[in-house]
């Protein structure tokens, strides 16, 4: 399946968002934010494009 440039950029942004939060953010917020709530599993949730 070929993707146009917009879909490729969107996929790259989703890949960048697919990571745990940095440790320094946990330290800065006194551990109020403990995990990435928008984490997505590649098999369970698809991107929709």
Image (spheres, rainbow, N blue to C red):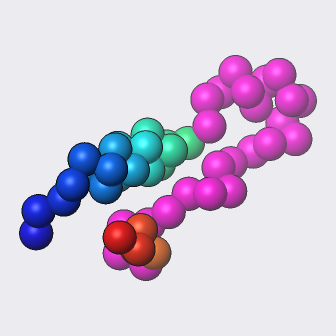
Q: Is 47 placed above or below 27 here? A: below
Extent of the magenta region: 21-44
31 and 6: which is toward the camera: 6
The overriding secondary structure of the stretch rendered in magenta is: loop
Q: Name the residue nearer the viewer: 22 or 16.
A: 16
Q: Residue furthest bottom?
A: 44
Task: Determine the residue positioned at 73% across, 27% down.
Answer: 25
Q: Give 26 or 45, whichever is nearer the viewer.
A: 45
Q: In which quadrant is the C terminus drawn?
A: bottom left
Extreme left residue here? 1
Residue 15 can be seen, yes or no: no
Q: Is residue 35 left or right of residue 45?
A: right
29, above or below 46, in the image = above
Q: Residue at x 75, y 45 (%)?
A: 34
Instruction: Please give the name of the residue rendered at 70% of the width and 21% of the height, measured from the top-left corner.
Output: 24
Q: Is residue 17 left or right of residue 10?
A: right
User: Residue 5: x, y in percent?
Assistant: 25, 47
Q: Is residue 27 left or right of residue 35?
A: right
Q: Where does residue 47 sit, x and y in percent of width and height?
A: 41, 68
Q: Residue at x 43, y 43 (%)?
A: 13
Residue 33 quadrant: top right
Q: Quadrant of residue 12?
A: top left
Q: How many marks?
A: 0
Note whether 36 is above or below 3 in the view shown: above
Q: Is residue 16 visible?
A: yes
Magenta stretch contains residue 22: yes
Residue 45, x across and y down, in percent: 45, 75
Does 46 sit left or right of 7 as displayed?
A: right
């Amino acid at each position: 399946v070929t993707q146009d440039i917009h879909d490729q950029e969107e996929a790259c942004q989703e890949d960048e968002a697919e990571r745990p939060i940095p440790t320094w953010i946990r330290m800065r917020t006194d551990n109020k934010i403990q995990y990435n709530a928008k984490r997505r599993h590649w098999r369970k949730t698809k991107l929709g494009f």
